[in-house]
Image: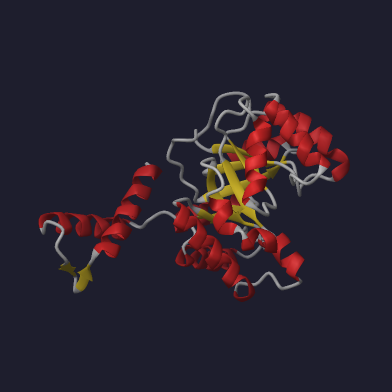
Amino acid sequence: MLNQPWVFRTMLMTSALNPRQYRSALRSGADVCTLDLEDSVPAARRDEARNRASSMFEGPRTGCVRALRINSLRTTDGLRDILALACGAIQPDALLVPKVNCAHDLRILEDMLGDQAGNMPFLATIETPAGLSAVEEIATATPRVRALVFGAADFTSELGIAMDWEPLLFARSRIVAAAASAGIPAIDSPTFDLGAELALKIDVNRSRELGFQGKAAIHPRQVAVINDTFTPLPAEVEHARRVIDLVHSRAGQISVLDGQMLGPPMVAAAQRLLRRVKALG
């Protein structure tokens, strides 16, 4: 899985205590289906959730990446999760690692997993002030890091601020920039209001405009809106192709298309969009 191109429009979270919900997630159209051992599982039931998780990654693969969110590396439950992974009892496609505070966290995790987990990719969650302060180093901590994920709920809790767009704009912008610098996608925090589709659409559009390549979801009904927003429109694809065709025909010289000057940054953006379209199939 490490060397395959992934699409990260939607990462749907489900509890390891609810197998039916997870099976539904696999059919939802989400690009990443994440089985959760952390926030959605009461502390007293985490051993039970871990045991259930071992069977949920068996069986035929679907079209989505099957990820596992473990508990914090700084907790006993997190260490138990790692032990289950290291001995092969649980075999997901990727790990969603919560509360990553520094690059060393991921390097230690890599060492503890050993050969049994192969090159299992990491999706590093930035949800603490310490993690945000070290986000550039976290993004390049190991080749296993395949995405940065913003965790707004824990982040705002630690800072004592509202979970609104404006107070979190700096954090989001820094995560997007760090991910882009490392050549990996940034995935935004979920929208927690399940009853407001308009609020979801506004959130997703803001995320895309800021540079996120996907967004976490907490319910299957959110998947379609997120996927649609992060899928390039036909007009965008056509424009990107025209950009590439024109630049090729002009042997790389600066050109003008529809009144807009086309320099190297515009060409690079068109190439990125077409690579994303190809990955989407």
Quadrant of residue 53 within the rendered picture: top right
Tell me: 249 left or right of 281: left
Which one is nearer the viewer's eye here, 202 or 180?
Answer: 180
> Is residue 188 visible from the viewing direction of this image?
no
- Please tell me which residue is depicted at 68% across the width and 54% down the height of the picture: 101
- Please tell me which residue is depicted at 82% across the width and 38% down the height of the picture: 46
For the C terminus, the image quarter is top left
Quadrant of residue 145 within the rendered picture: top right
- Please tell me which residue is depicted at 78% across the width and 34% down the height of the picture: 80
- Please tell me which residue is depicted at 16% across the width and 66% down the height of the picture: 254
Tell me: 193 left or right of 9: right
Quadrant of residue 128 within the rendered picture: bottom right
**Residue 91: horizontal and vertical position, in percent?**
64, 28
Which one is nearer the viewer's eye here, 87 or 106?
Answer: 106
Count of all numbered marks drawn on residues in the image:
0
**Residue 81: horizontal and vertical position, in percent?**
74, 35
- Its colouring scheme is secondary structure
> Is residue 233 visible from the viewing direction of this image?
yes
**Residue 16: horizontal and vertical position, in percent?**
73, 38
Q: Look at the picture and state if 205 lies above or below 7.
A: below
Q: Residue furthest left?
A: 250
Q: Residue furthest right?
A: 44
**Residue 155: horizontal and vertical position, in percent?**
70, 63
